[in-house]
């Protein structure tokens, strides 16, 4: 658009100069001569251009020049706006990427820690399960003698009462009070 503006300005200047000079033109600075009798008809005065039409050409070129100037202005504005948008997008993209890379690093570290904790917990579970299995086996071994003696609660209470009574009698005998 800039090159076109320069070209149109030069063309306008050339045309304005031409039309300015053509008003004063004389045919090669020769004085008017009478034509020979057998000469064909030619111009009866020097060519001065088509002034009203020439003015229209200059006006047209001026309109073209303003159109090019407007186009350049709009293009520059559009480029500046798009450049700003691109720069903003690039900045936001880099920032977003950095945040995501950082988040990825944190999540990777957290995953690694979690996997380590899981492995440790599984190992502790195996050890605890082994201890529980041993305790259950020992309980099963002791259960028949301690818990399942085949005697109900009432029978045990009755036996205990009898044992207490017999111990009291033994105590009286040892104390020498009742020798019947």
Image (cartoon, grey):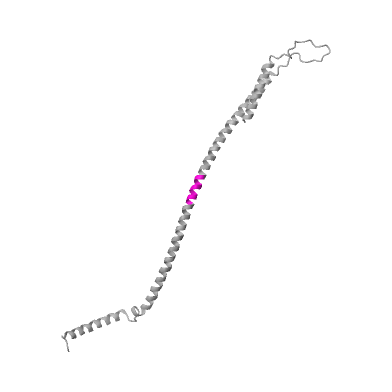
Q: Which residues are magenta?
A: 94-103
Residue drawn where x is 29% and y is 80% of the image: 156
Farthest right residue in view: 38
Q: Nearer the viewer, residue 133 or 47?
A: 133
- Is 180 placed left or right of 131 in the picture? left
Farthest bottom residue in view: 180
Residue 22: name its quadrant.
top right
Residue drawn where x is 53% and y is 38% of the image: 84
Q: Nearer the viewer, residue 12 or 56?
A: 12
Residue 91 screen position, x and y as percent: 51, 42
Whether residue 60 appears in this view of the structure is no
- Is 134 placed left or right of 31 in the picture? left
Q: Quadrant of the C terminus?
A: bottom left
Whether residue 54 appears in this view of the structure is yes
Main SS of residues in magenta? helix
Residue 34 screen position, x and y as percent: 79, 10
Residue drawn where x is 55% and y is 35% of the image: 80
Residue 40: name its quadrant.
top right
Query: In the figure, 168 relative to 93: above or below?
Result: below
Residue 179 screen position, x and y as percent: 17, 88
- Is 169 placed left or right of 136 in the picture? left
Residue 143 screen position, x and y as percent: 36, 78
Query: In the figure, 179 relative to 20: above or below?
Result: below
């Amino acid at each position: 658009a800039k090159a076109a503006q320069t070209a149109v300005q030069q063309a306008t200047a050339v045309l304005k100069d031409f039309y300015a000079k053509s008003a004063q033109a004389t045919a090669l600075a020769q004085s008017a001569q009478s034509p020979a009798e057998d000469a064909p008809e030619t111009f009866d005065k020097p060519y001065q251009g088509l002034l009203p039409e020439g003015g229209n050409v200059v006006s047209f070129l001026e309109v073209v020049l303003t159109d090019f100037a407007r186009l350049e202005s709009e293009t520059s504005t559009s480029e500046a706006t798009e450049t700003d948008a691109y720069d903003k997008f690039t900045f936001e993209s880099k920032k977003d990427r950095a945040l995501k890379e950082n988040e990825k690093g944190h999540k990777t570290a957290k995953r690694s820690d979690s996997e380590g904790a899981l492995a440790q917990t599984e190992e502790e579970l195996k050890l605890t399960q082994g201890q529980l299995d041993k305790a259950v086996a020992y309980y099963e071994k002791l259960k028949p003698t301690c818990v399942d003696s085949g005697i109900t609660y009432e029978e045990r209470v009755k036996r205990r009462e009898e044992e207490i009574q017999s111990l009291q009698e033994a105590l009286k005998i040892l104390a020498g009070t009742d020798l019947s």
